[in-house]
Image: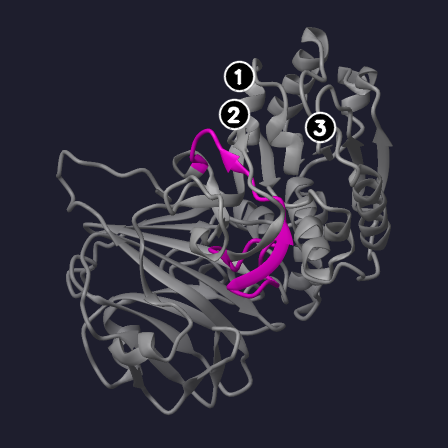
Amino acid sequence: MRSTSRMATAVVGAALVLGCVSGPAASDPDADPDADAGRVLVFSKTAGFRHDSIPEGVAALKELGASSGYTVDATENAGAFTPSNLRRYDAVVFLSTTGDVLNGKQQRAFEGYIRQGGGYMGVHAAADTEYDWAFYGGIAGAYFESHPAIQRATVHVEDHAHPATAGLNTAWDRTDEWYNYRSNPRDRAHVLASLDESSYTGGTMEGDHPIAWCQQYQGGRSFYTGGGHTKESFAEPAFRQHLLGGLRWTAGDAQADCRPENGYRPIFDGTAASLADWKQAGPGSFDLNDDGTLTTTGGLGMLWYASKGYGSYSLKLDWKVDGDDNSGVFVGFPPSDDPWSAVDNGYEIQIDATDVPEKTTGSVYGFRSADLAARDRALNPPGEWNTYEIRVVGERLRVWLNGVQINDFTNTDPARSLRDGHVGIQNHGADDQVSFRDIRIKELPAKGSKTSTAPGN
């Protein structure tokens, strides 16, 4: 099995050399492949109910794979689950499997595959599979409980950076068979999309109804989507885009933060109303786009959250560069109408993958370089979304990129302090085009408190 970061690292490396290289967008299911992305096994054995959409699902995954450089093999033979055979694959898709489909030896082979960095992707009835195998229940995230009649419902996209959902509208209306699950995976997995139970009849999860999620699981990657009951699903462009994005992440060819995320409060949610608590400093500014993103325009500027300063917190936001662009996220600065005040009194988490080490993406600009090897493995190329977590507790500042910690810095400058300050996003210059979305924050206990919170939770 190849390294799960091979393709992403190669693309990033080219971007660092050329400054403006971008791979195919995660949201384009018909993009031409720029390389052989790897090999995928689609497994669709059933020992219970059999979905008549399985042939359409297999065909769709083969078509999506061919358009993106994947070799896709399909089988219903559980004998394919041997250590030597599974090593050939970067991802294994359980496509509407049902019941007990693997024996003990085959289960152990799959467990070993995942623990060695393999990828699992579950589609629809994959949650109706292997109820007595605890490892499978964990990697699937939740087991099927029941479903109402096929009907139209609204899917709420919670994560706009993951490649499975990056190209979808916040409200995604579609028809499918909507599963209820025996447990809520939110505390264990990162929820990408959930059902609006008021938009259809038969939901039983009391208003918090995840329908697609991802997680790192025992050394491997896991992505699940509840869609895909109907034949029509696999001809639906948005659902195909959703599948391909999930597959790219599962195979390790796109990066995303799949740690559980709970307790965050949005301070910019894509609406004009949420900008009421922000102020613009300097001549540059940001355009609010129809898709809920902010994009830099004009000259140097700083858009900062004026409603409140923070001392101990986790700040998360999604960002995307168009090419070799420059921007940053500032923390720990006092209120000011001068954008240079943040430079002189706070700290910048840089966005510019082609700059020198102490001034490149993930660095605390001018003070501490990111772990460049970890950064390169975690970084998506221009044109694709990335997620920062910037965690401040006392004078310690840590940075995660797409769920991977890449920096750990402690302020020792008596003229600066991270203990109380504002947060903001930078417009570096007129020629730079950087977009931001979904800025959210969670306040944390101050340093020395007996209460602690794990990163990303």
Q: Is residue 180 magenta?
A: yes
Kindly identify the residue that appears in the image at 49 percent across and 44 percent down.
Answer: 202
Amino acid identity at mark 1: Ala
Residue that badge 2 annotates: 138
- Which comes sooner in the sequence, label 1 or label 3? 3
Mark 1 to mark 2: distance in Å? 6 Å
Kindly identify the residue that appears in the image at 55 percent across and 30 percent down.
Answer: 144
Kindly identify the residue that appears in the image at 82 percent across and 44 percent down.
Answer: 56
Mark 2 to mark 3: distance in Å? 16 Å
Magenta segment's dominant SS is loop
Residue 91 location, x and y as percent?
72, 35
Residue that badge 1 annotates: 134
Q: Nearer the viewer, mark 2 or mark 3?
A: 3
* Above or below for 404 versus 145: below
Q: Residues within 10 Å of mark 1 (few under 14, many from 20)?
A: few
The quadrant the N terminus occupies is top right
Residue that badge 3 annotates: 97
Q: Residues within 10 Å of mark 3 (few under 14, many from 20)?
A: many
Question: Is residue 403 among the parts visible in the rendering?
Answer: no
- Region rendered in magenta: 156-185
Residue 224 location, x and y as percent?
60, 39
Q: Secondary structure at mark 2?
A: helix
- Which comes sooner in the sequence, label 2 or label 3? 3
Q: Secondary structure at mark 1?
A: helix
